[in-house]
Image (tube, helix red, strand yellow):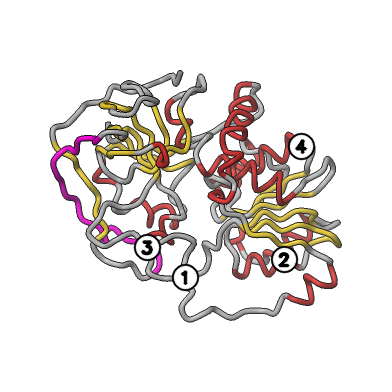
Amino acid sequence: MPTEIPAYSTPSRNRQVLLTTRPAGVPQASDFTLGSSDVPRPAEGKFLVRNIYLSVDPAQRGWASSEANYSAPVPLGGPMRALAVGVVTESRHPDFAEGEFLYGWFGWQDYAVATPQQVILRATQNLPLTAFGSLLGINGITAYLALTELGRPKAGDTLVVSTAAGSVGSFVGQIGRSLGCRCVGLTGDDRKVGLCTGRYGYEAAINYKSGALDEALAAAVPDGANVYFDSTGGPILDTVLRRMVVGGRIVQCGTASIGSWNPLPTGPRNEREILTRRLVWSGFVIFDHMARYAQAADEMARLHQAGTLGFDTDLADGIEHAPGAIASLYAGENLGKKLIFIG
């Protein structure tokens, strides 16, 4: 049963954050409007979820875009696709009871009529309710599964992580340390450098905006990197690629530095690096790994309860903060997993 459950209301209208303009690049507050509708009622076989915490995730940039992605674009005029932590307030499904807390595809809105297929995780672990949108959310489970399944780190490996203080990278460093890796983080803020080394498991951290990244990386990983966990792409990836050891593994988890994929951006040709270093370069999308989600969530909860894994949330209060939240995320303004309390 979740702990630290905040008081929440059951409003008589359903406030919604509607996507009204197709964004060019990162969605801005002006791409959304706030609307409201009647509170929906669940039909037979469905249940009503009252959202308490809305999740803000880098993947929402792709979901709002018209460009090719791994999911269909969010329809204009509809509520923004989003994960949320909520509570069942009315159920017409035998397997879901009123008062049960869930994490799933409930959108940026107060209420969602849901089916079992929209539920990612039932909140059964003895953790703060915010943990289900952060530690056990797609960011935490991505960190665990992508690192262990694709990065395959071994004790003594050097692990380099971009966006190292972000909602995924902050867990990658801690998990890597627990597996016996020497972890080096890349981030764009001196304040976050301190978080990386003081809280998130990194032996060293580099502010890539300070210049001379290649020189700083050469000093931090003089013998090269065995694993690179990347969420940025672009010039940072090009630099780290040339510091990989023979047989290294690259986990591509995001491409946050790329402003647009239309037209295709150009850059250094990296085929020769892949060949001569015999690298394994793999892309990771959490939705390909849902069969292992619950198992990974139990392991993340165990690590947290053992004191090995901490988590931070960057919590905003009020649904009015949602329209500008994705832009704030890409600007690096958050410290910890970004959630919005709307209860």
Q: What label sits on residue 259 in the rendered view?
A: 1
Q: The residue under label 2 is which amino acid type?
A: Asp
* Residue at image point 84% right, 67% down: 277
Is residue 34 rendered magenta in the image?
Answer: yes
Circle 4 sits on which residue? Answer: 179
Q: Earlier in the sequence, mark 4 or mark 3?
A: 3
* Residue at image point 37% right, 69% down: 66
| Labels 1 and 3 touching (C-beta < 8 A) | no
Frontmost of labels 4 and 3 is: 3
Q: Earlier in the sequence, mark 1 or mark 3?
A: 3
Q: What label sits on residue 214 in the rendered view?
A: 2
Is residue 202 rendered magenta in the image?
Answer: no
Q: What label sits on residue 73 in the rendered view?
A: 3
Q: Is residue 264 above or below residue 53?
A: below
Q: What label sits on residue 196 in the rendered view?
A: none
Q: Earlier in the sequence, mark 4 or mark 2?
A: 4
Which range is magenta?
25-43
Neighbor class of circle 3 (other Cα within 10 Å; few <14, some 14-19, many 20+) is some
Spatial CA distance of label 1 from label 3 is: 17 Å
Spatial CA distance of label 2 from label 1 is: 23 Å
Frontmost of labels 1 and 3 is: 3
